[in-house]
Image: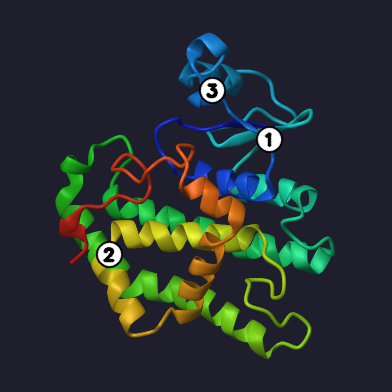
Amino acid sequence: MNLYYWPTIQGRGEFVRLALEDAGVDYVDVARLPKKKGGGVEALLAMMGKAGAPVRPFAPPFLEVGKLVVAHTANILQVIGPRLGLVPKDERSRIAAHQLQLSITDFVAEVHDTHHPIATSLYYEDQKAEARARSKHFIKQRIPKYLGYFESVLKENKANARRKGPFALGRASTYVDLSLFQVMVGLAYAFPKAMRRLEIEEEVSHLVALRDRVAARPRIEAYLASERRIPFNEDGIFRRYPELDA
């Protein structure tokens, strides 16, 4: 499989990387290859300009899966999840996983908008006042709302005899759990004070346990310690601006 995403940030592509790494897939992170080996941003842009199957992608990330070129994080995970054993094969479970992943996608978009509330074409420095106002509401209202929802899903699994277990869909780990891990560590990087308060108050205890459980998975643990894991930085989605972590 060939993954196409920006080579210097985790961003939305990281949710796909985590799935590929956890499954032990031999994949190529194309834009991170040297240009002389057919990599670099030029290779990514060239691929975007080609006719795709089933349709040309609008933006990264996108993944070559055989003859398919699949774009959008949630769509990619929906396609590769069953192939990699990262979601149960029954339709009910696959729909539930995709539904949860779409909610994660919505949340990640709101995270991005804390530092770019007006336009992505403007620098953060051009919209700092608006970013502060947006982040204040994000910390007070949106983080508790989204994490509260995911926390409730994990709690409800414990009471559900059919899918009783510690993961998002119950007994078995799925790509949703990997994505929730990324959300939790990303928020801890971007908003450490806000997340510390939530953890101290034990409002996200099930999510914290899930985060630690995923981090301890052998392939994920190895990935996090490797050079393949791009560090969080202020060019990605999760950015640490202390003034926003009020």
Q: Secondary structure at mark 1?
A: loop
Q: Quadrant of residue 24?
A: top right
Q: Which residue is mark 2?
A: 192
Residue 128 is tagged as none
Residue type at mark 2 is: Pro
Where residue 179 appears, as percent x and y from the top left, is: 55, 58
Q: Are circles 1 and 2 on residues that touch, CB within 8 Å?
A: no
Q: Quadrant of residue 143?
A: bottom left
Q: Which residue is mark 1?
A: 26
Q: Which residue is mark 3?
A: 44
Where residue 3 appears, as percent x and y from the top left, is: 60, 33
Closer-to-camera residue (86/244): 86
The image shows residue 114, relative to residue 38, as above or below, that is: below
Q: For the residues marked 1 and 2, what is the alpha-carbon distance in whole angstroms?
A: 34 Å
Residue type at mark 3 is: Leu
Residue type at mark 1 is: Asp
Marks 1 and 2: which is nearer the front?
Answer: 1
Where residue 216 appears, as percent x and y from the top left, is: 54, 62
Closer-to-camera residue (236/226): 226
Marks 2 and 3: which is nearer the front?
Answer: 2
Q: For the residues marked 2 and 3, what is the alpha-carbon distance in whole angstroms?
A: 33 Å
48 left or right, relative to 81: left
Q: Quadrant of residue 170?
A: bottom right
**Lower sequence index among marks 1 and 3:** 1
The image shows residue 235, relative to residue 175, as above or below, that is: above
Q: Are circles 1 and 3 on residues that touch, CB within 8 Å?
A: no
The image shows residue 122, relative to residue 100, as above or below, that is: above
